Image (cartoon, helix red, strand yellow):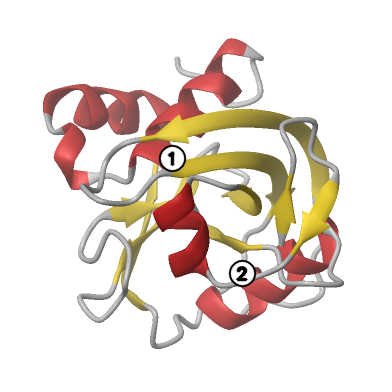
């Protein structure tokens, strides 16, 4: 879904079109936290078009035409990590201009969601690995090896820390 600089819908098209033209688009990003305070991260499969092999949000994805951020968030959680029946909490919408992949202009509005979850995970084909990790070691890893992660995850996670939603001890 294409949007203007104020997040108003102006049309639709493919991911490739938005990356080529720099048109703003919408992304739903989900952070799952368990009762221990750990967050779930997923490693993108090597077959992914964008950021293959990098660690990413618990789940995330483009908002499709005619879909709300919330609908996209629930769809992505189900498709990527096989989870249904949770209640997502809308946390904030942040604008980003990601530059982690040459030739792709990623101007995005990112609606961040969180949820408490202690159950099992069934990764879909887009995911090669999942890991529960405490916020402090995750932040340290991001600082030491930023290329292990999507730029979007680094930006979003640091924003959660600023807002005191993800807590380091």
Image point (27%, 75%), residue name: 45
Q: Nearer the viewer, residue 8 or 120?
A: 8
Mark 2 — residue? 119
Residue 87 visible, this orientation: no
Q: Please, is residue 59 above or below residue 84 in the view?
A: above
Q: Would you say 137 lies left or right of 34 here? A: left
Q: Nearer the viewer, residue 162 or 52?
A: 52
Q: Position of residue 129 (x, y in %)?
A: 30, 70
Q: Nearer the viewer, residue 32 or 23?
A: 23
Task: Identify the mark nearer the N-term, 2 or 1.
Answer: 2
Image point (25%, 48%), residue name: 101
Mark 1 — residue? 152
Quadrant of the snapshot with the N terminus: bottom right
Q: Would you say 161 lies left or right of 90 here? A: left
Q: Would you say 37 lies left or right of 144 here? A: right
Q: Please, is residue 158 above or below residue 53 in the view?
A: above
Instruction: Report, in whole angstroms, how far the alpha carbon at label 2 lies from the one at label 1.
Output: 25 Å
Q: Please, is residue 71 above or below residue 105 in the view?
A: below
Q: Please, is residue 12 above or below residue 140 in the view?
A: below
In the displayed image of the protein, which residue is found farthest to the front? 21
Q: Quadrant of residue 108?
A: top right
Question: Circles 2 and 1: CB distance less than 8 Å?
Answer: no
Kind of element beneath mark 1: helix
């Amino acid at each position: 879904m294409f949007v203007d600089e104020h997040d108003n819908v102006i049309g639709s098209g493919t991911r490739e079109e938005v990356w080529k033209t720099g048109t703003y688009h919408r992304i739903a990003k989900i952070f799952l936290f368990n009762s221990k305070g750990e967050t779930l991260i997923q490693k993108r499969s090597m077959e992914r078009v964008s950021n293959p092999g990098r660690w990413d949000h618990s789940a995330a994805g483009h908002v499709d035409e005619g879909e709300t951020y919330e609908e996209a968030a629930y769809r992505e959680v189900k498709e990527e990590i096989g989870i249904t029946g949770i209640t997502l909490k809308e946390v904030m919408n942040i604008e980003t201009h990601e530059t982690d992949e040459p030739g792709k202009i990623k101007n995005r509005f990112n609606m961040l969601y969180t949820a408490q979850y202690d159950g099992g995970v069934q990764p879909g084909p887009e995911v090669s690995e999942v890991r529960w990790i405490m916020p402090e070691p995750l932040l340290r890893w991001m600082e030491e090896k930023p290329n292990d992660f999507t730029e979007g995850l680094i930006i979003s996670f640091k924003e959660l820390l600023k807002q005191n939603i993800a807590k380091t001890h």
